[in-house]
Image (cartoon, helix red, strand yellow):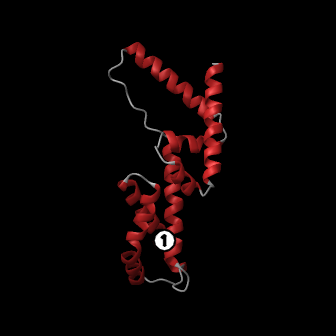
């Protein structure tokens, strides 16, 4: 059982490592800080069940990693769509229609391919980062990415 003072010491000792862990997954320092804050809240709520004999630091890293992955998944589901102010109204409508069509096509892919495609092309992550984040083999990420791209291209050709 971890008391409040012990928890404060734990936070001082591990906050930096938790932040670095979050930064490995997230490109935004604000998002990484939010993940650390949420992880600390979660740890605080279960502090009475934490045992000094066990590795609380390892648990903290796992919680941060999982929360960072959840953040990436949420970001992939709700991508930021850039506006095109230099286009005419007709041009903007066409871009919007093609973008909506692309999103519909992506949504038909298997969930893992959707996630990998979005992480690579929307979030701008490198394949190695994706593999680490999803705990996958790099070759499997490349294979899923290739299949997803091929499926999107084939579906666009049909429409």
47 or 116: nearer the eye?
116
Quadrant position of residue 86: top left
Q: Is 120 on the left-hand or right-hand side of 84?
A: right
Quadrant position of residue 107: top right
Q: Position of residue 138 (x, y in %)?
A: 60, 52
In percent of the image, x 38 and y 15: which residue is there?
89
In percent of the image, x 36 and y 18: which residue is there?
87
Q: Position of residue 12 (x, y in %)?
A: 36, 76
In percent of the image, x 36 and y 56: which residue is there?
29
Q: Where is 24 relative to 10, above or below?
A: above
**Label 1: few (<14), some or many (≥20) within 10 Å?**
some
Q: Is 131 on the left-hand or right-hand side of 12?
A: right
Q: Position of residue 152 (x, y in %)?
A: 61, 30
Q: Position of residue 13 (x, y in %)?
A: 38, 78
In percent of the image, x 59 and y 29: which residue is there?
104
Q: Is 53 on the left-hand or right-hand side of 140?
A: left
User: How many tags in the picture?
Assistant: 1
**Label 1 residue SS:** helix
- Mark 1 sits on what residue? 43
Q: Where is 93 relative to 73, above or below?
A: above
Quadrant holding the C terminus: top right
């Amino acid at each position: 059982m971890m008391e409040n003072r012990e928890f404060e010491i734990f936070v001082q000792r591990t906050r930096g490592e938790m932040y670095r862990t979050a930064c490995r997954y997230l490109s935004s320092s604000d998002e990484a800080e939010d993940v650390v804050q949420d992880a600390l809240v979660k740890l605080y709520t279960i502090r009475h069940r934490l045992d000094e004999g066990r590795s609380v630091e390892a648990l903290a890293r796992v919680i941060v990693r999982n929360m960072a992955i959840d953040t990436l998944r949420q970001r992939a589901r709700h991508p930021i769509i850039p506006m095109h102010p230099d286009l005419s109204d007709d041009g903007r409508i066409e871009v919007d229609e093609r973008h909506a069509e692309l999103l519909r096509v992506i949504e038909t892919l298997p969930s893992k391919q959707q996630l990998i495609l979005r992480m690579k092309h929307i979030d701008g992550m490198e394949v190695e980062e994706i593999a680490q984040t999803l705990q996958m083999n790099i070759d499997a990420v490349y294979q899923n990415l290739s299949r997803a791209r091929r499926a999107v291209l084939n579906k666009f050709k049909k429409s």
